[in-house]
Image (tube, rainbow, N blue to C red):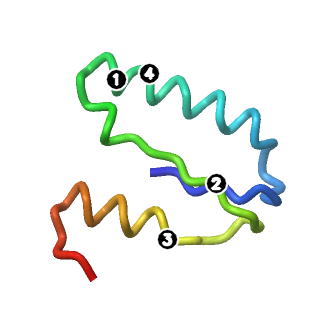
């Protein structure tokens, strides 16, 4: 799970997306593409948590809120 803030100064969105695409393709080829996800949000380098917690609920089969 990758969280990506559009105003994150670590790297441009395009670079992050390109690197994530490599990982996602590998996961797809191994038959587990649903185990790789990226969430973009309008913010800086921070823990956003929204998509990540939903991803964890789905992957770990946590009960819904």
Vertical order, 27 against 59 (above or below): above
Of residues 62 and 44, the one drawn nearer to the viewer in this rendering: 62
Report the disc number at residue 50.
3
- Along the polypeptide, which appears first: circle 3 or circle 1? 1
Report x, y in % for residue 53. Answer: 38, 69
- Along the polypeptide, which appears first: circle 2 or circle 1? 1
Q: Residue furthest front?
A: 64
Corner quadrant of residue 58: bottom left
Separation of marks 2 and 3 at Cα, in angstroms = 10 Å
Report x, y in % for residue 27. Answer: 34, 27
Report x, y in % for residue 15. Answer: 74, 33
**Mark 2 surroundings within 10 Å by alpha-carbon count, few (fewer than 14), some (14 through 19), many (20 or more):** some
Of residues 26 and 51, the one drawn nearer to the viewer in this rendering: 51
Corner quadrant of residue 62: bottom left
Left of 56 or right of it: where is 25?
A: right
Q: Secondary structure at mark 1?
A: helix
Left of 32 or right of it: where is 45?
A: right
Report the disc number at residue 28.
1
Circles 2 and 3 in contact, beta carbons < 8 Å: no
User: Which residue position is annotated with label 2?
Assistant: 40
Separation of marks 3 and 1 at Cα, in angstroms = 24 Å
User: Which residue position is annotated with label 4?
Assistant: 25
Circles 4 and 1 in contact, beta carbons < 8 Å: yes
**Quarter holding the C terminus?**
bottom left
Circles 4 and 3 in contact, beta carbons < 8 Å: no
- Along the polypeptide, which appears first: circle 4 or circle 3? 4
Left of 55 or right of it: where is 49?
A: right
- Which residue does the image show at 65% across and 28% down from the upper left? 18
- Along the polypeptide, which appears first: circle 2 or circle 4? 4
């Amino acid at each position: 799970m990758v969280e990506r803030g559009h105003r994150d100064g670590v790297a441009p969105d395009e670079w992050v997306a390109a690197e994530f695409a490599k990982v996602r393709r590998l996961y797809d080829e191994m038959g587990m593409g649903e185990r790789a996800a990226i969430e973009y949000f309008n913010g800086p380098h921070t823990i956003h948590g929204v998509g990540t917690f939903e991803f964890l609920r789905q992957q770990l089969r946590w009960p819904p809120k």
